[in-house]
Image (spheres, rainbow, N blue to C red):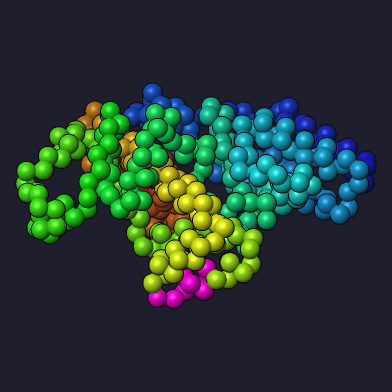
């Protein structure tokens, strides 16, 4: 086996030292100034096996290896990735290196793009704990990516006050330019007549600052199902089995919030619950702000950049046909904005062609 491993490592090093030549990508006229996007849109997908010429079956099972053999192969694999500008970005930090070897070698037929200009981020997590190759070491289902979806630092100072306001049942408005906030009782906006009856104030004479702001976000109190999910998540963190069972039973009956509060207020976990809820609501606020920023970026593309013909006229995106190949493709109408734009560019480039081709096609 040792001689075989030496040869396998040599083969991997040979690939790393001799990466494929950069593919010729003819940028469409509207992407001449954006070669990275053109490369991403037009470079075909192929398996790591096809790109390297090394078959998946060339890698021995972990149980057949001894000493540092798996480690040497793993290091050679990452050397290949570095040469091909492929970065594995979702490997859990705490995953044992021998398990990582298994993940890499059993996913050798994962599809990638060779992008010498920009490089490719490779993700092997399936999002499903039952099929994810990282197994118990993965955080499948987590929506918040601290690196990719990080909240801009300038917003951090207003997160606690927004969270406090909506936790108190108020609507909080945030000026996106100045970061000024305004808290409003929902009744004032939703039922002015009732507001006047309860407070004695004339809603028409109430000055709302946010109405004069050019750009703002509105944050509303959590929906019932969202508050319920926070309670469930907190219960999952408890180590006290008796309290855990009491709370689980309480939220499964009528008036779950009142029952939960009565039990938690009389327990030793009262402060922990307040801290946990505060953290969850603040995370909720962060996600909302990040999503709003991302939507703004998408809107800017559509309203400012868009897609243009060779003569400089703007393309009506609604007029771009959707080939039958796209309809059965898993990438069609993806939740990924960038992926949708690339698909749109590809369809636009071929809108007058008789035969539509797509290197990213995957049957749904």
Horizontal and vertical percent position of residue 216: 25, 38
Horizontal and vertical percent position of residue 154: 39, 28
Q: Is residue 23 left or right of residue 166?
A: right
Is residue 355 shown above or below 21? below
Of 317 and 252, nearer the camera is: 252
Q: Give the residues drawn in magenta, as a range.
A: 247-254
> Which residue is found at the position 38% from the left and 23% from the top?
33
> Which residue is found at the position 49% from the left and 38% from the top?
148
Q: Is residue 36 left or right of residue 171?
A: right
Of 229 and 138, nearer the camera is: 229
> Which residue is found at the position 58% from the left and 54% from the top?
140
Horizontal and vertical percent position of residue 193: 9, 58
Is residue 246 shown above or below 178? below
> Which residue is found at the position 19% from the left and 34% from the top?
213
- Please identify the residue farthest to the bottom as the structure is shown: 253
Please say whether residue 360 is visible from this viewpoint: no
């Amino acid at each position: 086996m040792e001689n075989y491993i030496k040869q396998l490592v040599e083969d991997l090093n040979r690939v790393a030292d001799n990466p494929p030549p950069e593919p010729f990508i003819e940028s469409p006229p509207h992407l001449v100034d954006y070669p990275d996007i053109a490369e991403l849109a037009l470079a075909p997908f192929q398996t790591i096996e096809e790109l390297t010429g090394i078959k998946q079956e060339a890698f021995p099972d972990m149980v057949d290896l001894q000493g540092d053999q798996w480690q040497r192969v793993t290091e050679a694999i990452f050397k290949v990735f570095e040469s091909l500008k492929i970065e594995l970005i979702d490997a859990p930090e705490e995953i044992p290196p021998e398990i990582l070897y298994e993940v890499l070698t059993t996913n050798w037929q994962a599809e990638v793009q060779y992008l010498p200009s920009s490089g490719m981020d490779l993700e092997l997590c399936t999002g499903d704990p039952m099929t994810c190759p990282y197994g118990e070491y993965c955080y499948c289902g987590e929506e918040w990516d601290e690196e990719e979806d990080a909240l801009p630092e300038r917003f951090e100072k207003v997160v606690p006050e927004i969270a406090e306001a909506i936790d108190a049942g108020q609507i909080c408005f945030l000026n996106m330019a100045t970061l000024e906030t305004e808290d409003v009782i929902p009744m004032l906006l939703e039922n002015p007549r009732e507001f006047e009856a309860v407070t004695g104030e004339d809603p028409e004479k109430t000055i709302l600052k946010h109405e004069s702001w050019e750009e703002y976000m509105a944050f509303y109190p959590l929906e019932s199902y969202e508050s319920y999910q926070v309670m469930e998540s907190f219960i999952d963190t408890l180590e006290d089995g008796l309290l855990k069972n009491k709370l689980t039973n309480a939220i499964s009956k009528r008036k779950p919030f009142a029952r939960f509060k009565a039990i938690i207020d009389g327990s030793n976990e009262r402060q922990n619950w307040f801290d946990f809820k505060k953290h969850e609501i603040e995370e909720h606020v962060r996600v909302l702000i990040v999503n709003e920023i991302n939507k703004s970026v998408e809107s800017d593309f559509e309203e400012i950049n868009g897609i243009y013909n060779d003569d400089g006229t703007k393309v009506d995106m609604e007029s771009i046909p959707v080939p039958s190949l796209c309809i059965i493709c898993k990438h069609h109408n993806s939740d990924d904005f960038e992926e949708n734009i690339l698909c749109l560019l590809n369809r636009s480039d071929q809108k007058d062609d008789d035969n539509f081709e797509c290197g990213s096609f995957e049957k749904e």
